[in-house]
Amino acid sequence: MAALKSALGRVASFGKSIIENANPFATRAFSSQFAVSPRLTSHHIVILGLDGVHTDVLQRLMKAGRLPALTRLRYRREHVAICYVVNSSSVLFAFFLRFRCLMRPYRHPCVRSKEGTFTMRAKCNYPSISEPNWAACIYGTDPQSLEFYDVLETYPAFDHLEEKLQFESIFSLVKTYVPHSTTAAVYGWDLLRDILNPRFVDMDLAADLKLSHFDRDEWVVQQTVDLLQSDDPPTLLFAHIDNIDEEGHEVGILGQRYEDAIISADAQVQRVLDALAHHTHTTLFVVSDHGRARRTDGRDHNEFSPEAINIPLWVSGPTVQAGTEPLHANIMDIAPSVLQLLHIPQPWCMRGRPIQHVHATQPHPQTH
Ligand SMILES: [Zn+2]
């Protein structure tokens, strides 16, 4: 019996060595698939990136009531009011409903998809530019670990990150662990393609570069809405809105066009929220990748200053503790939060950790 076990072990290790020698990345896929059995989940994730938002300008616009969608993502009080108005057929019932919303905010269907935790003090990483920080978002670790050094003329792409440095992205992990999962990336800023491995992105939708930056964002939002309203929405969807950063480079944060770009993005966020209205099993992350530099009135953003490093972060979903502010959040914490929500074990290569107030979902059979 012992001899039989030993022989079987030798056969298994020989098979694994063939796979390792053929393709170094396949080793991790092999071990990921068989070391831990996949968990079933029907939860969906949407990450909406707003490129280059200065938190001071954002705060001013929110206070002035110019950003209703992004403000709605933040507060629970408004959702209580929505429940009160929409569902009350009598004063007594309204009071009862209001009481239920306040006492059981995570179970009431009116507030399930509209809860939010929000901070303007989340951090991006230095260098405070887009490639390193969107990579930090997708790979769940800091740009230093990903070898995005400031002196390089070109930054590492997915083949270097995944094959040489052995990092795994949320796209590869979702495809490996969630049975029948689909992933999508929608963007108008073409450099994102460098960090997205097409092997793990089922729907790689890039806008026509001949369009203006604003029109590319409109295209991105329409594609996102179409995907969310389809019969089979993706398990993981990453969408990137770019025009805020472009206007920042053009006119700085003092220009009206910069404010207008954030207000337009708010309307685009509203369209995504409308598309998510009936998605009770979806968590939405909205995040920026960097702020704006103090020295240039925001025309640039690669600066080690609070204005460039502080970023806004919203998370909304059925297991998010609403009306809270997460402490010590970083853009690299989004990937570990996604893994926690989908019951995927966090690999060693991810140095981030789940965002405070974003709790694990209950595993249940997959419906899509
Ligand atoms: Zn920029």
Image: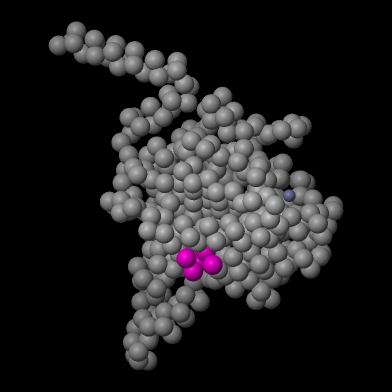
How far across and how far down the image is residue 258, in percent?
Answer: 75, 63
Place residue 196 in its image quadrant.
top right
- Would residue 285 be visible to someone looking at this image? no
| Outermost left residue | 1
Does 284 sit left or right of 262 as displayed?
Answer: left
Q: Residue 164: x, y in percent?
A: 56, 24
* 274 inside magenta stretch: yes
Q: Vertically, is 305 above or below 345? A: below
Q: Nearer the viewer, residue 283 or 256?
A: 256
Magenta stretch: give its range.
Answer: 271-275
The quarter of the picture where residue 299 lies is bottom right
Left or right? Give the position of 191 relative to 24. Answer: right
- Residue at 59%, 65% in the rendered image: 268
Q: In which quarter of the image is the N terminus?
A: top left
Residue at 71%, 33% in the rendered image:
154
Residue 15 image point, x, y percent: 34, 16
Q: Which of 203 and 53 is in front in this view?
A: 203
Residue 347 visible in the picture: yes
Colour scheme of the rendered structure: one colour
Direction from residue 285 to residue 57 in the image, left or right? right
Q: In this view, does 36 lie above or below 174?
A: above
Q: Which residue is drawn at 35% across and 89% down?
A: 89
How many numbered discs sit on the rendered protein?
Answer: 0
| Magenta highlight: main SS | helix
Residue drawn 41% across and 59% down? 230
Residue sitting at the far bottom: 91
Q: Which residue lies furthest to the right in this view?
A: 296
Q: Nearer the viewer, residue 300 or 144?
A: 300
Q: Residue 255: x, y in percent?
A: 81, 65
